[in-house]
Amino acid sequence: MNIFRSFDEINFQKDTILTVGTFDGIHLGHQFIINKLLKISEDNHLRNLILTIHPHPQIVLKKTGKSSVSLLTSIEERLELFKKFRVQNVLIIPFTYEFSQITAREFVVDYLIEKVGMKRILIGYDHLFGKDRNGNENLLKELSPIHNFEIERLERIGEADHSISSSAIRKALLNSDLITANKFLGHHYGLRGEVIHGLKRGRTIGFPTANLLPDDEHKLLPPVGVYFVYSIIHGRKYYGMANIGYKPTVTSNRILTIEANFFDFNLDIYGETITLHFVKKIRDEKKFSGIDELKNQIKLDKNTCLELIS
């Protein structure tokens, strides 16, 4: 997969089909767009290109007093998923306040057409772009005959009254509803980060853990609790259990940690980057009377996870 990190890096190619968006989470709606993009690209011998935005516009344009958006995917997680879904070319738009002031018309003409070579554009049912999000399908229809490009509008994907969106997935995750979140994502929610040294208390009770430092400070963490997870490490899938929380039984400080204990695992992975994939929440975090009670509960948690492995 070719990765371009600015418009200056990408070469002009007049037969390009593209789509533009944040693609946070790369959920089923995004995957529908990606598959459509690849199909049209293959059928018409066009270069396929996804333009994704980083940092998230809501982070750059954050208003005073308002909380910043929590990300479903860091930029590196997004790139991994694009590669998984066989995307051939990705352009990361470095989003800044200055870039946010570019009008929708300028963005289409000066960037998509003149710098990239857009021949066809795929847009979602609610696609808005450009300064103050004033760009829409009507503007594209106005520019299309002038600049000789085609537009394909894709409808909403959803079921019942629930539309699949990054916002809906964030809400589900914050409500500990991993079933809905993973269903809308079309894959298990992931948390990517570096394995760092912890206090190594886990190994003293027979459950050594990998402590994870997320690779993006804006990443949305599942609520505090114990989870059934897995990770692909050195090409092999390892199941395990992860705790997100404050370890109230062993410490009184309020420092949030992310720890995973993998089953049948004895590799040294300190300093390596791994992704935890969250399958199911097992229970809430709680304070136990002592180490023995904690250890017994962890054994029960492990048995619960082992029963979930199919």
Image: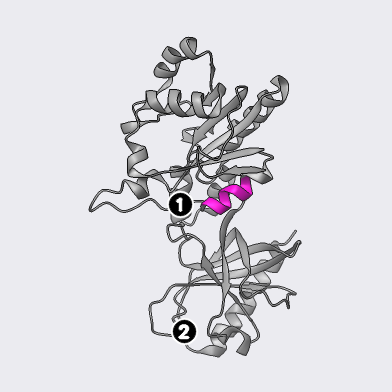
Residue marked by disc 2:
249
- Say which element carries label 2: loop
Q: Amino acid at mark 2?
A: Thr
- Quarter that holds the C terminus: bottom right
Q: Identify the residue at image location x=42%, y=28%.
A: 107
Q: Amino acid at mark 1?
A: Leu
Looking at the picture, tell me which residue is in the foreground, 3 or 206: 3
Number of residues whose C-alpha sits closer than 10 Å to that of mark 1, classed few (under 14), some (14–19) or many (20 or more): many
> Which range of residues does the magenta coloring cover?
75-81
Q: In the figure, residue 248 lies in which quadrant?
A: bottom left
Q: Magenta region's main secondary structure?
A: helix
User: Tag count in the figure?
Assistant: 2
Was residue 80 drawn as part of the magenta stretch in this picture?
A: yes
Vertical side of 76 occupied by 267: above or below = below
Was residue 36 drawn as part of the magenta stretch in this picture?
A: no
In this rendering, position of residue 305 left or right of residue 285: right
Q: How is the image coloured?
A: one colour
First reached walking from the N terminus: tag 2 or tag 1: 1
Disc 2 from disc 1: Cα separation: 30 Å
| Image position, residue 154 (x, y; %) | 54, 24
| Image position, residue 131 (x, y; %) | 33, 32
> Which mark, residue 71?
1
| Image position, residue 264 (x, y; %) | 75, 74
